[in-house]
Every structure is written in structure tokens, then in C-alpha cells.
Amino acid sequence: MKNQNLYKYILTIADNSLILAHRLGELCGHGPNLETDIALTNISLDLLGQTRSYYQYAAKLKGESNTEDDIAFLRIEREYKNCLLVEQPNTHFGYVIGRQFLFDVYHFMLMERLQNSPDETLAAIAKKGIKEVSYHKRFSSDWVKRLGDGTEESNKKMQEAIDDLWRFTDELFYMTDSEKAIAKEGIGIDVSTFKEKYYEEVAEILKEATLTVPENKYFTKGGKEGVHTEYMGFILAELQYMQRTYPNMTW
């Protein structure tokens, strides 16, 4: 492959969107109300659309007649480079919103910067997706505030979700060797440069939602290196079922 590092770099971005889209897709028809149900489904579709663009580019780099479907459905668990945050389960609505919020703030900051990449394909994907990601961030931030500053029960559940998911946030800023190499070339983004800004913005929104910023200093990582939680195998078993059961199936 001509550019192995660029291929792996694309996966660290695209796999986040794929796995989170799958998690949100599990909620279709199960939202707390019709409007929110449709909104979450639309966010899932937005993320899948972005994923397709990334995988199409990755398949082109990989060559050998590879397609976006091959990359999505025919890799094994260790070959997925998504962060652990996005594979966490839909425990309750507070977890769904907390997971989305903690990812959206990061995702928006990443896309903002990726728009200026000298790689025309990556820049085009970011420029097209930034409006969608801006909406995702606004949606999840508003819900964090509504739940945090709502009833005693909603506050308790939102705080529970933030406390439990917090340990996965540091991995968002962990740089793999491929990310470092592509950032050094000026094509990719050094995500560590906006880590401080991320935590400042998250803290500001949590404060507005009358929620407490977790003091936990223990963080979990591994997903970006292919070491996932126990949930990932179950996700892939469902996600890849049709393609694995009926190899080379086409519409």
C-alpha cells in the first residue's frame, strides 16, 4: 500500500463514526419520544454517511479491488481503531446523551481543523460534515442541560452517565504512531493540541447543566490500538452478520 499511515489514520476517524452510528441505530423506535427518536436516527445516518466517504477513500488507498464494504464488514475486532467511548452500551437515555455529548465536542473540534488539511479528500469530507457535526453537538449539549437541570432523577442519571463515561475521554487525545506520522506530514490533526480546550468547553456546559465535573484521574484506553471492551465483539457480530453469512452478497 502506498500510504499505510494515511490508511490507518482514516480508520481512527471513520471507525468512531461507524460504531457510534451502530449504537444509535440500536435505539431506532426506542427513543423517549418520537421527535428525539427521529433525531437520534438522523444523527446515526449522518455518521454513516461520513463513514462511507472515509471508507471509500481508504479503499482507494488500499487498492486491490477493495471496497468500502470490505473495510466495514470484513475486518476482525483488533483491526478496528475506534475509541472505547463510542462502543459503550445504551444503558439508559442519560448514557446515550452523555456518550454523544462527550464525543460531539471532540468531533466538532477535530472537523473544524480537518477542513484545512492539504489532503483535498479529507478536507472535503470535513467541510461537508461540519454542519452535521455542529447540529450533533448542539443537540447533545442541549439535552445534557435539560437533564442535568431538570428533575432530581434526571440530574442523578445524567451525573451517573458522565461519571461512568469520563474515564474514556482521555483516549480521544491519545495519538497512535500513524496519527503522529500523518500529523507530522501536515495532513492530519494533532488532537493533543486542543485537549485543554475540549475539557474547558465540556466543563462549562456541565456547570451550566448543574452537573459536577468528575475528579477521577484514572483513564482507560486501548481502542485506538485495537484493544477493545467486551462490547465490541457483540457489536461486530450483529453489524457483520449478513456479509459474513452470505459472502460476496450484492444488492
Image (tube, rainbow, N blue to C red):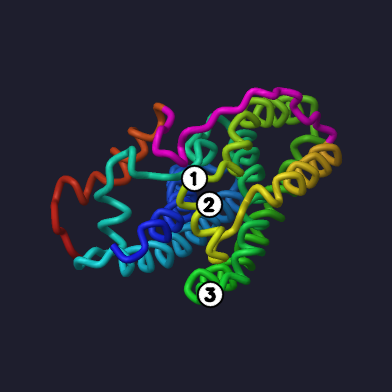
Is label 2 or label 3 in front?
2
Q: Is residue 136 above or below residue 220?
A: below
Disc 2 crowd rating (10 Å Cα; few below 14, some 14-19, many 20+) is some
Q: Which mark is residue 180?
A: 2
Is label 3 or label 1 in front?
1
Mark 2: amino acid:
Lys
Magenta stretch: helix, strand or loop mostly: loop
Q: Which mark is residue 176?
A: 1
**Quadrant of residue 133 in the image?**
bottom right
Q: Quadrant of the C terminus?
A: bottom left
Whether tag 1 and tag 2 are in contact, CB under 8 A, the answer is yes
Q: Looking at the picture, how far across and down is residue 93, in whole percent?
A: 60, 36
**Quadrant of residue 62 in the image?**
bottom left
Mark 3: amino acid:
Ala
Disc 1 crowd rating (10 Å Cα; few below 14, some 14-19, many 20+) is some
The region drawn magenta spans 210-229
Q: In this orientation, which residue lies closer to the viewer: 219 or 15? A: 219
Q: Does label 3 or label 1 sit earlier along the sequence?
A: 3
